Structure formats: C-alpha cells, structure tokens
C-alpha cells in the first residue's frame, strides 16, 4: 500500500510533499517520543503521532520514513510543512484518534516490525 492509499483510508488530508505519496509503506510505528521513534522505527514506516513541530520531520528524514500521520485533527506548524515539502516527507492530517488510525492501518495489512 502506498501513502496516498493509506491517507484515503484514514480520512487524511495531505499537508506536505504530495509529490512523494506513491511511496510504498513497509510497516508502521506509533509514538510521540522522538527518541523512541529514532531508535525503533524503521525505513519505510508510516509514523502515527500527535507531534506537529519541525523536529518530527528531522526524525522522519533520519530514519527515511514513508510518511508522518498527525492525529486528532492536528496540522503541521508552518515551518514543519515547509521542511517536509523540501525533503519530500508526506504529512497527513486526520481527524481520527491514534487508536483508530492504527487499527485501520493494521486492518489494511500494515504491521509494526520488531526491532529486536
């Protein structure tokens, strides 16, 4: 499944990097703690979070994540969207809660990937 397909399924709106939405999702990760995401997410993961500041883009770039999903109707701060656009990391905003987003993604076959 690619980022564009996943965005539709979670009622998401693409907020940045629309040119990168054909990227295939390899797995999923959910956390609001940036150090946790840096240490445990894997390349190609779609990341579910409530964090909307520019540092999320740096973390997504570091681990080469497929996309960032902002839950509960959050939208990226302006500098976050600009930076995501520059480096091609899609940001999706959804009105859904994290629990529901993760459940939908799981039902679509996107799984977390053990790091140990």
Image (cartoon, grey):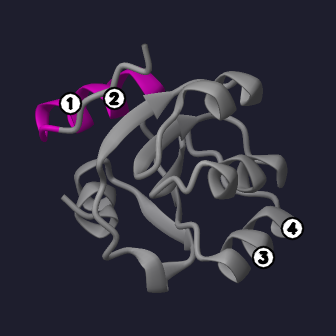
Main SS of residues in magenta: helix
Magenta residues, start to end: 97-109
Mark 1 nearby-residue class (10 Å; few <14, some 14–19, many ≥20): some
Q: Which residue is mark 2?
A: 102
Badge number at residue 79: 4
For this view, does 107 lie left or right of residue 18?
left
Instruction: Tell me if residue 110 comes above or below residue 22 in the rendering.
Output: above
First along the sequence among labels 2 and 3? 3
Residue matched to label 3 = 82
Q: Residue furthest bottom?
A: 19
- State which tag comes first along the sequence, 3 or 1: 3
Q: Is residue 85 above or below residue 92?
A: below
**Label 3 close to label 4 by CB (< 8 Å):** yes
- Point out residue 18 in the picture as x, y percentages from the top left corner: 48, 81
Real-space CA distance between mark 3 and mark 1, rounded to the nearest whole angstrom: 29 Å
Q: Relative to the observer, which residue lies in front, 97 or 103?
A: 103
Q: Secondary structure at mark 3?
A: helix
Task: State the CA–CA distance, disc 3 to disc 4.
Answer: 5 Å
Q: Secondary structure at mark 2?
A: helix
| Quarter of the image that includes the C terminus | top left
* CB-based contact (under 8 Å), mark 1 and mark 2: yes
Residue 62 drawn at (x, y percent): 69, 52
Crowding at mark 2 (Cα within 10 Å: few <14, some 14-19, many 20+): many
Classify mark 4: residues with Cα within 10 Å, few (<14), some (14-19) or many (20+): some
Label 1, label 4: how many angstroms apart (C-alpha)? 30 Å
Q: Is residue 2 magenta?
A: no
Inspect this view and state whether residue 105 appears: yes
Say whether disc 4 or disc 2 marks the residue closer to the N-terminus: 4
- 75 relative position to 41: left or right: right
**Considering only vertical position in the picture, is 77 above or below 19?**
above
Looking at the picture, how far across and down is residue 15, in whole percent?
58, 69
């Amino acid at each position: 499944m690619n980022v564009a397909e996943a965005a539709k399924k979670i009622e998401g709106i693409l907020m940045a990097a629309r040119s990168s939405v054909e990227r295939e999702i390899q797995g999923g990760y959910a956390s609001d703690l940036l150090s946790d995401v840096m240490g445990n997410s894997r390349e190609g993961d779609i990341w579910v979070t409530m964090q909307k500041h520019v540092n999320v883009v740096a973390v997504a770039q570091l681990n080469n994540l497929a996309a960032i999903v902002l839950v509960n109707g959050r939208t990226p701060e302006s500098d976050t969207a600009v930076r995501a656009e520059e480096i091609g990391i899609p940001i999706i905003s959804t009105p859904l809660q994290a629990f529901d987003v993760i459940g939908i993604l799981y039902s679509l076959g996107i799984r977390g990937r053990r790091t140990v």
